[in-house]
Image: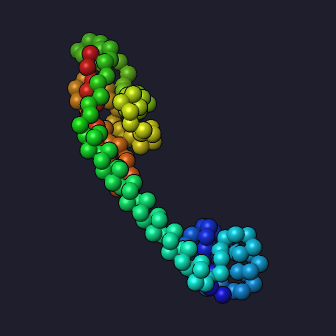
């Protein structure tokens, strides 16, 4: 019997996958527990409409991420820090501080999206990468002043 998986089931199939399985397994486990439905015209049409909706949503999110990438590239975040002898910065600029500044500017960025390769512990300009969407990364400048 051919079934269409409507949920991921480890070792068996992923959502949207069509697979041929034994009749008893399909009826008594997969369909009964809501992991799959029988492959027929109606269910195939549902699957295709879900795929097209997901593709449209994905495209919309990509466009929004590209627009956000352009906006973020124009932003410069300034942080005033205390310095010691020889302009040595006490502490460093954290991801949380960067996130808080972005929120103040009206951006909805999660701290998990912000990437800092090395701690920001010196005066001047630093580039920070922000993961906006799968495959789309934005850059923002962080200016550390005393």
114 vs 56: above or below:
above
Question: Does residue 72 appear to the left or right of 33 in the view shown?
Answer: left
Identify the residue at horizontal 37%, vertical 41% (top origin). Answer: 115
Question: Does residue 25 appear to the left or right of 6 in the view shown?
Answer: right
Residue 19 is at least partly visible in this image? no
Identify the residue at horizontal 23%, vertical 30% (top origin). Answer: 125
Residue 89's x, y, as percent? 31, 19
* Residue in front for this viewpoint, 86 or 13: 13
Identify the residue at horizontal 58%, vertical 84% (top origin). Answer: 41
Question: Does residue 19 appear to the left or right of 96 in the view shown?
Answer: right
Residue 108's x, y, as percent? 42, 38
Quadrant of the rendering where the C terminus is positioned? top left
Quadrant of the rendering where the N terminus is positioned? bottom right
Residue 109's x, y, as percent? 42, 39
Residue 25's x, y, as percent? 73, 81
Question: Does residue 73 appear to the left or right of 34 in the view shown?
Answer: left
């Amino acid at each position: 019997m051919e079934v269409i998986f409507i949920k991921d089931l480890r070792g068996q199939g992923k959502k949207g996958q069509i697979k041929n399985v034994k009749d008893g397994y399909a009826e008594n486990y997969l369909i009964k527990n809501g992991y799959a439905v029988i492959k027929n015209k109606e269910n195939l049409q549902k699957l295709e409409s879900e795929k097209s909706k997901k593709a449209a949503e994905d495209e919309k999110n990509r466009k929004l991420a590209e627009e956000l990438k352009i906006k973020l590239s124009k932003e410069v975040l300034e942080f005033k820090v205390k310095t010691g002898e020889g302009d040595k910065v006490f502490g460093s600029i954290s991801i949380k501080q960067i996130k808080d500044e972005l929120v103040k500017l009206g951006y909805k960025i999660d701290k998990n999206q912000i990437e800092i390769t090395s701690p920001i512990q010196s005066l001047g300009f630093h580039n920070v990468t922000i993961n906006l969407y799968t495959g789309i990364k934005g850059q923002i400048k962080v200016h550390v002043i005393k």
